[in-house]
Image (cartoon, grey):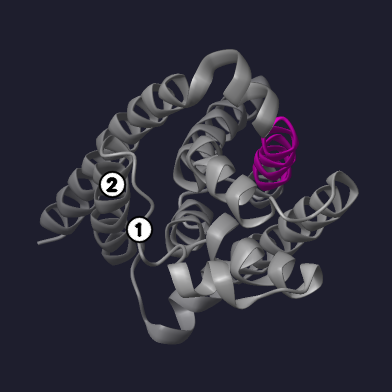
Amino acid sequence: MVEIFNIELQYLLFCLSTLFTVVNPLGITPIFAAMTEKFSNDDQKRIAQKGILTGSIVLIVFTLLGSFIFRFYGITVEAFQIMGGVIFFRSGLRMLDAQVGRSRTTQSERDEFKDSDELAISPIGVPLITGPGAITGVVILSGKGTSEYSILVLLLSVIITMSLFYLILRAGNYLAKRIGIAGMRVIERMMGLILMVIAVQFIINGVETIISRM
């Protein structure tokens, strides 16, 4: 039992570090602030809540359907690892340049929605908060579980990550004043480097498993 606990604790820490880096709250927060600057503080709070809720539901659905997707389409975990590694590497590269990819948001999307409810669901909830990288991440992580408790651990990591994301969104203005935009960019670049390392490791693991089966 102690061994299972230690394994699942390591899995939880791995899921948290991967998801938090992929969703990139420090990089998204300035964009969220710019997109919601015309709204009152109460509206901004409601938009953040609904956006996080929307993104969380999407991640939970893909967490629960990860194994089904593998079976239904005949996809191996290794194939998803390699593909996910490529996506993560590109995302990490953009984070090193302090940029948000086009798959996250476009200028037209930022200007299109005037209603706060529409804005909260899309493009903020999806794909700004929960983009292709985050969805790919939970699907990959769902296939890396080692016990019947792993899916619960992954769900817990999703909830913790999105809760932290909400707190960072709400504290965005304060963080910008305390550490400055430059400070946030430095942290984002560090997270981008970590994400690129995770991406390379995903690719290595996938390739090694494929070769070992030959």
Q: How many marks?
A: 2
Compared to residue 99, the image places residue 182 above or below, namely above
Is 167 within the magenta?
yes
| Neighbours of disc 2 within 10 Å: few (<14), some (14-19), many (20+) | some
Residue at the front extreme of this rendering: 38
**What kind of element bears circle 2?**
helix
Q: Is residue 3 visible?
A: no
| Contact flag, marks 1 and 2 (Cβ < 8 Å) | yes
What amino acid type is highlighted by mark number 1? Gly
Read off the residue under disc 1: 101
Along the line of sight, which residue is nearer the eye, 89 or 189? Answer: 189
Residue at mark 1 to residue at mark 2: CA–CA distance: 7 Å
Tell me residue 180's x, y (percent).
51, 20
Tell me residue 158's x, y (percent).
66, 47
Compared to residue 160, the image places residue 89 above or below, namely below
Q: Is residue 21 visible?
A: yes
Q: Residue at x 29, y 58 (%)?
A: 87
Circle nearer the N terminus (1, 2): 2
Q: Residue at x 66, y 75 (%)?
A: 113
Tell me residue 191's x, y (percent).
39, 30
Decide if residue 5 is on the left or right side of residue 28. Answer: right
**What kind of element bears circle 1?**
loop
The magenta stretch is 156-171
Read off the residue under disc 2: 94
Q: Residue at x 60, y 33 (%)?
A: 8
Along the line of sight, which residue is nearer the eye, 214 or 141? Answer: 141
